[in-house]
Amino acid sequence: MSFYVVVGAGPVGRETARRLGEEGHDVVLTSRSVGSNALPNVRTIRADATDAAELSRVCRGADAIFMCAMATYHRWPTDFFPIIDGTVRATEAVGAKLIVLGNLYGYGENADRPLRSDMSLDPTSKKGTARTIMWQRAVRASVPAIEVRSSDYLGHGAISYFSLVALPSIIEGKPTAFIGDLDATHAWAFTKDVASTLVAASRYTGEWGRAFHVPSQYASPRELIRKTAAMLGHETPETRSYSVPEMEALGMHELVEMRYLFESPLLVDSSDAETLLGVKASSLEEMIADTLRDHL
């Protein structure tokens, strides 16, 4: 059995720790505010990822470190860099492998579709630039690194545009608004599938210094809203798209920058993860049911 450290105790970090622990590995789940847990073989230790020396002590003897920590969304361009830098230095100090949880922002608005994991990163947003720089710093480390890139989350406890903007109204049976083209096909990633991909990537025996895409399911926002309402036993709500002025007036400034992700089809090629890592996407119905776990 191996020793793993998962940095970041959000839905993906906890699920990653759970899977590793259930396999019988010794696992530490760490963040600045991590609480207790009842996961088998998983210990929780409070640590600040920006403090490389502190994190190194937690990680001593680790075979691999999973960087699943998040920064506050509007502070990505400032707060994410100390997190990745501290994690990279700690990983180098203990000689572990590094698996980074990333997303698709780095490809930018002008990338061809479907997005492939071997595409060059060409960000067109501040957040995409931050993610690109993070991966550049990770891949330049003296230890092997892989990035697992995910589309927008579905799943219990997931924080995403869908869960923040549309889901509360759907649950209440009220008219629902979302962003972008409501009929554009969009890739959705299940938090449990993200964790499966992270764990599988940690065992990849090919050449590291590369990325994998999390296998996703596809639905337009309108279709996802309809299916979510149906699972709750509700009629399909009246649905519309926010205009940019409305978004600005409502304080959705951070969403305006990333609106392009929903203005045209977002297609993701995950064939390499499916073939090389043996992971596949759960059904969309399972993703929705888990997202609604507390409401069914």
Image (tube, rainbow, N blue to C red):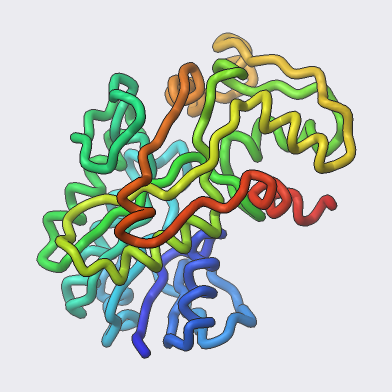
Residue 284, percent from left and from top = 63, 44
Q: Nearer the viewer, residue 190 or 125?
A: 190
Residue 24: x %, y % from top left: 47, 88
The quarter holding residue 170 reads top right
Nearer the observer, 36 or 15: 15
* Left or right of residue 216: residue 49: left
Residue 80 visible somewhere in the drawing: no
Give the residue at x 34% y 86%.
2
Count the labels in the image: 0
The image position of residue 187, as x and y in percent, is 50, 36
Q: Is residue 211 visible?
A: yes
Q: Position of residue 210 (x, y in %)?
A: 21, 52
- Quarter of the picture holding the N terminus: bottom left
Q: Residue sitting at 27 percent across and 42 percent down?
A: 117
Q: In the visual, does 106 lie left or right of 136?
A: right
Q: Please state if 76 lies on the left or on the right of 192 as rendered.
A: left
The answer to whether residue 31 is above or below residue 95 is: above
Would you identify the image quadrant in which residue 5 lies?
bottom left
The residue drawn where x is 82% and y is 26% is: 236
Left-right relation of 142 to 177 = left
- Residue pictured at 21% horizontal, 41% vertical: 118
